[in-house]
Amino acid sequence: ASKKLHKPHIFLPHLVASLEVEETYIMIKPDGVQRGLIGEVISRFEKKGFKLKGLKLFQCPQELAQEHYKDLQSKPFFPKLINYITSGPVVCMAWEGIGVVASARKLIGVTNPLNAEPGTIRGDLAVQTGRNVVHGSDSPENGKREIALWFKEGELCEWTPVLEPWLTE
Ligand code: ADP
């Protein structure tokens, strides 16, 4: 059982934030919703200064969960992962900002919450990989792909927050 706990804690090059305006798909998983952590998680992205473009509470169907996690299809934990993600409502979010993809991954922390740094969402709020509260896209390409997968046309808002000049030059 101890083998399961250790995925090495490595910062991959794509975790270095870019200077481009990007979009990322962030999802509060069913455990985060059940544990009453919706406000806590949203608040961290809001306070950081990213722009929320889409937000909904949603019961994810099996097929969508399978499509979203299709790169993990061959993993032994795949069926468990699909059960977990479809076990209750999730909160789907699209966030925009400079370097938001890598920055959001840093705010979230590494996959195994026991290895995640204090101060990160997983580091502060979770203990197990199979219940790690939140998802964040791992590349700008996947950010676009996942937002298109989880949101329909008309569900995203283009808007300019009045605070924008106080957050970016
Ligand atoms: P991340 O969500 O940090 O990008 P991965 O893409 O590697 O991580 O995995 C996707 C999700 O699959 C994880 O967040 C977690 O919910 C689940 N998962 C990954 N590895 C395991 C595992 N060994 N056992 C159970 N669930 C896992």
Image: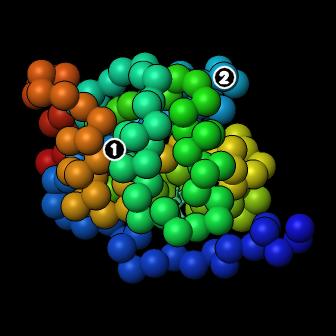
Which residue corresponds to the image point at 36% horizontal and 50% vertical from the top-left? 67
Label placed on residue 35:
none
Asked which quadrant contains residue 142, the reply is: bottom left
Image point 20% across, 41% down: which residue?
148
Q: Secondary structure at mark 1?
A: strand
Image height check: is 9 above or below 60?
below
Q: Residue at x 30, y 36 (%)?
A: 150
The reply to whether discs 2 and 1 touch (Cβ–Cβ < 8 Å) is no
Q: Quadrant of ligand 1?
A: bottom right
Is residue 78 in view from this perspective?
A: yes
Q: Position of residue 18 (x, y in %)?
A: 25, 67
- Report the side of 13 relative to 126 (left or right): left
Mark 2, other Cα within 10 Å: few <14 / some 14–19 / many ≥20: few
Quarter of the figure that contains the N terminus: bottom right
Label 2 or label 1, whichever comes before in sequence order: 1
**Residue bearing mark 2:** 34
Q: Which residue is mark 1?
A: 25
Circle 1 crowding by C-alpha within 10 Å: few under 14, some 14–19, many from 20: many
- The answer to whether the beta carbon of the residue marked 2 is less than 8 Å from any atom of ligand 1 is no
- Which amino acid type corresponds to the residue marked 2 in the rendered image? Gln
Q: CA distance from mark 2 to mark 1?
A: 20 Å
Name the quadrant containing residue 147.
Answer: top left
Q: Position of residue 8 (x, y in %)?
A: 66, 78
Name the foreground residue: 40 vs 6.
6
**Number of marks in the image?**
2
Q: Amino acid at mark 1?
A: Tyr
Q: Which SS class for mark 2?
A: helix
* Residue 59 coordinates in the image, percent (x, y): 46, 23
The residue at 33%/56% (across/down) is 101
